[in-house]
Image: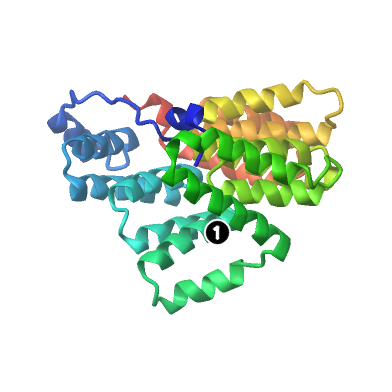
Amino acid sequence: MAKRSLIGRIFGIKKKSTKVDVKELKKRLEDNPKDLKAILKLGDYYSTKRKKNKAIEYYQTAARICIEDGFVNKGIAIVKKIATLDQKNPEIYRQLADLYLRQNLFGEATIQLQKALELDPDNAEIKETLEKLTGTSDDQRAIIDSLRADREVQIASQTETEEIIREAKEQIRKQISNEDVVEHYDLGVAYMEMELYESAIEEFGITLNSPEFFEDSIRLIYECFFSMDRIQDAIEYFKALLERPNISPLQKGVIRFHIGMAYEDSLETNKAIEIYEDLLNTGYPKPDVLIQRIDRLKHTASFDDLA
């Protein structure tokens, strides 16, 4: 769990207007079955009305549309909404795991599979997949177990949250220096598993200084912001990185690509296209990825223009 000062930002529920014209939204869907905003508004509406099954139905439809159109990260965010409504359904966590695997986010996939296994302990398929994904070293596992123990204590004694987290971090930091890149990377992954995303970002902020870990660190930093539903903060973070004097042109391309992803995931389609096209014109080393994203965005109904 995160520090108390961060709980509101990480777990707080945003207020949503209950003034929804259901008939009008359903009429919009008759005219355009892929009207994502209408689908999500209906899902939110039924969720506030405690009609869980109806809300899940709309959320699943929205997630399917996003995934089919290539917006996997947005699909993940919507399936996470479903998980909050249907916390005892192992299939939801398996669905999340599959989506994370498509994004090569093996640590996040492992977390979701562990949740699924807790709900369905006799599922051989989940066990087998977990065994394939779990290649954690003894040292890293010790760190994770230590953090998990701290988390359990924190749950039992909420008033000691900040002190527990601070002491755990201090104890681990005493054992590693900024030059121990692998250890910082493993620690960042461990913090992600514990949902300590702020701490994970700190660790990946160290490892991105190593060329070998730069791209993975940027990707995981974005995943942390994404998991906290703080995509705009991710954009500001990456823009600040672009101002560093020691960032190479290739690294700037990686950062700008993730800014494009952030705009894409926040449904600012035109801004995403602008960045991808600029990267394409300036020789980004993965042109096929850019072309696919640009084509998909241009041929999918523009989310920004949906009323």
Frontmost residue, 140 versus 170: 170
The residue lying furthest to the left in this view is 23
Q: Which residue is mark 1?
A: 101
Q: Is residue 154 left or right of residue 282?
A: left
68 w.r.t. 1: above or below: below
* Residue at (55, 59) in percent of width and height: 101
Relative to the observer, which residue lies in front, 176 or 264?
Answer: 176
| Image location of residue 108, percent across then percent down | 54, 53
Q: Is any atom of residue 181 visible in this view?
A: yes
* Vertical placement of residue 151 versus 16, above or below: below
The residue under the point 53% across, 38% down is 226
Q: Position of residue 288 (x, y in %)?
A: 67, 47
Q: Quadrant of the C terminus?
A: top left
Q: How is the image coloured?
A: rainbow
User: Left or right: where does residue 14 sit relative to residue 104?
Assistant: left
Question: Which quadrant of the figure has residue 163?
Answer: top right
Compared across the picture, whether 210 is left or right of 280 comes to right
Amino acid at circle 1: Leu
Mark 1 surroundings: few (<14), some (14-19) or many (≥20) residues within 10 A: some
- Which percent across, then down, holds residue 84? 33, 46
Camera-side residue: 15 or 242? 15
Please identify the quarter of the rendering in which residue 19 is found: top left
Examine the rendered structure and indicate whether residue 114 appears above or below residue 84: below
| Residue at left offset 20%, top offset 51% | 53
